[in-house]
Image (cartoon, helix red, strand yellow):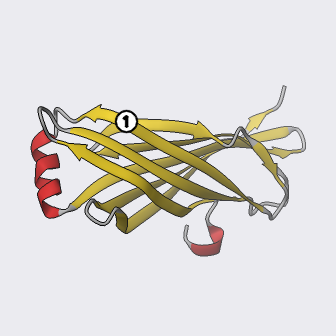
């Protein structure tokens, strides 16, 4: 799924700040602002319950935030949801060697997963939807900017009868 057919897309990711302390142990301070576009391509309205964003480094989760508080998207419509993720004083123990190596290169790769969960109502049925966008985000620590991001969407649906 790409382009107009995407259910969820990371439309903006901004690095607010990144700070690294290496003495006595590697400590990471990090803040991202994220805007997600949720697109309802169906002919029925969609209610979403949660938006969850997590950030990781080399396969280990650093932190997560939930936001948006839920909402409703009309048929064939879109909505934008914002979230800010702030991590202060995360001690990088297991991957200290890799972090020091990435610091020397000047670019640190982070993993982000953005998940939206909701329901599509269809007569006597409800279709639970779970959509995830996974991104690799490369941050230049000297310029405090995002150098590159690569994103991959996934959608999970299952049909159940409403009680």
Quadrant position of residue 15:
bottom left
Q: Residue at x 12, y 36 (%)?
A: 23
**Residue 128 seen by the camera:** no
At mark 1, the secondary structure is: strand
* In this view, 157 is above or below 135: above
Q: Quadrant of the C terminus?
A: top right
Q: Residues within 10 Å of mark 1 (few under 14, many from 20)?
A: some
Residue 141 lies left or right of residue 114; in this view the side is left
For the residue pair 114 and 76, the one nearer the viewer reads as 114
Quadrant position of residue 162:
top right
Toward the right, the furthest residue is 123
* In this view, 37 is above or below 72: below
Q: Residue at x 85, y 55 (%)?
A: 44
Residue 80 x, y percent position in the rendering: 69, 57
Q: Give the number of marks.
A: 1
Toward the bottom, the furthest residue is 3
**Residue 42 seen by the camera:** yes
Residue 103 lies left or right of residue 44; in this view the side is left
* In this view, 111 is above or below 76: above
The residue tagged 1 is: 88
Residue 33 lies left or right of residue 61; in this view the side is right
For the residue pair 22 and 3, the one nearer the viewer reads as 22
Residue 21 x, y percent position in the rendering: 20, 41
* In this view, 137 is above or below 93: below
Q: Residue at x 74, y 63 (%)?
A: 41
Toward the top, the furthest residue is 163
Residue 2 x, y percent position in the rendering: 55, 71
Q: Residue at x 21, y 36 (%)?
A: 92
Quadrant position of residue 69:
top right
Residue 52 lies left or right of residue 74; in this view the side is left
Residue 53 x, y percent position in the rendering: 51, 44
Q: Quadrant of the N terminus?
A: bottom right
């Amino acid at each position: 799924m790409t382009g107009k057919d995407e259910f969820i897309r990371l439309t903006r990711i901004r690095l607010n700040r990144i700070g690294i302390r290496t003495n006595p142990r590697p400590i990471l301070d990090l803040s991202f602002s994220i805007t997600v576009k949720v697109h309802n391509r169906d002919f029925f309205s969609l209610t979403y319950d949660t938006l969850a964003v997590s950030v990781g480094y080399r396969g280990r989760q650093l932190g997560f935030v939930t936001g948006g508080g839920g909402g409703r998207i009309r048929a064939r419509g879109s909505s934008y949801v914002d979230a800010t993720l702030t991590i202060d004083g995360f001690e990088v123990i297991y991957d200290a060697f890799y972090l020091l190596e990435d610091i020397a290169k000047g670019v640190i790769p982070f993993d982000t997963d953005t998940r939206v969960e909701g329901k599509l109502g269809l007569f006597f049925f409800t279709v639970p939807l779970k959509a995830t966008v996974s991104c690799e985000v490369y941050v230049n620590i000297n310029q405090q900017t995002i150098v590159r991001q690569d994103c991959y969407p996934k959608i999970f649906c299952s049909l159940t009868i409403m009680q």
